[in-house]
Image (cartoon, rainbow, N blue to C red):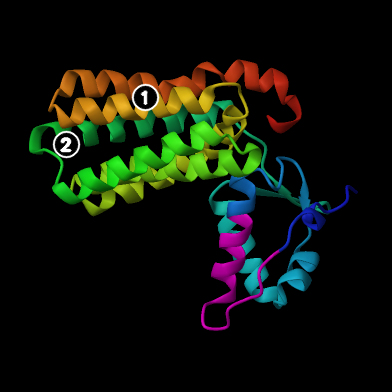
Amino acid sequence: MPESCLDKLTFPALDFARPAADQIFDAVKVAILRMDLEPGCLISEAELGARCGASRTPVREAFTRLREEGLVVTRPSRGNFVSKLSPDRMKAAQFIREALELANVRWLCTVGLSDEIGMQLRQNLSAQARVVQVREEIGGRRAFQALDDRFHALLAQGTGFERAETLLVREKAALDRLRVLALNEEMHMTHLYSAHQAIFDAISARDSAAAEDLMAAHLRGVLTMLSNLVTAHRDYFE
């Protein structure tokens, strides 16, 4: 049986004011989506409980939720493994995400950006530009991905529809690990930042056709890299 890969991680101490299962689920989910826990690696329930200082019940509850989100698969008599990347699932998630994001920019071009959302988007883009300029390896890539997530979340928030962001986050999760791999590619952050700036400018100008075209091209970019990423990281994919 393969060895557990949890020795690569340090888990924070549990906050007894919050449900333990929620904290364990959040910590493992983040580690998987950041690729700190690589696709195919074994996660031992007993070891995870020991590292977190939690009993078996919250650990099992966390694993149930991770399985429901497709992040962990359980193989009888072998254990729990981080799920491998599925090109088919990614393409489906991309299809739904694109529909949501195009609806968001179409709406924003119709009603306009509020002063508050516009200011936050400008601040976000300035921060993206700084990260692109510094390029601090893993730390820089993670910082950029957080800013990337925030940029798209702000567009969803700008619509005023609460579920617009909730649905976007859910569908985008299926693509997050592919995005981490893509950020390792030379100049990818620069291209993403330029696309974000162009999308913002088109929305600010209330140019719906341009904003939608730019957003569609931007979102499809990671899938155009899919075949190359599968070749380069074959063990990560189904």
Residue 60 sits above or below residue 34 on the image: below
Q: Residue at x 22, y 32 (%)?
A: 105
| Residue at the far bottom in the pictured view | 16
- Alpha carbon separation for disc pair 1 and 2: 17 Å
Whether 22 is among the magenta residues is yes
Q: Horizontal and vertical percent for residue 218?
A: 39, 23
Neighbor class of circle 1 (other Cα within 10 Å; few <14, some 14-19, many 20+) is some
Horizontal side of 57 relative to 105 (left or right) equals right
Count of marks, rendered view: 2
Q: Which mark is residue 108?
A: 2
Residue 55 sits above or below residue 190 on the image: below
Secondary structure of residue under mark 2: helix
Horizontal side of 183 relative to 93 (left or right) equals right
Horizontal side of 92 relative to 75 (left or right) equals left
Q: Horizontal and vertical percent for residue 91?
A: 48, 26
Q: Could you tell me the amino acid type at mark 1?
A: Ala
Magenta part of the chain = 11-29
Per the image, the residue denoted by label 1 is: 195
Residue 7 in view: yes
- Which quarter of the image is occupied by the C terminus? top right
- Whether label 1 touches label 2, CB < 8 Å: no
Neighbor class of circle 2 (other Cα within 10 Å; few <14, some 14-19, many 20+) is many
Q: Could you tell me the amino acid type at mark 2?
A: Leu
Residue 158 sits above or below residue 183 on the image: below
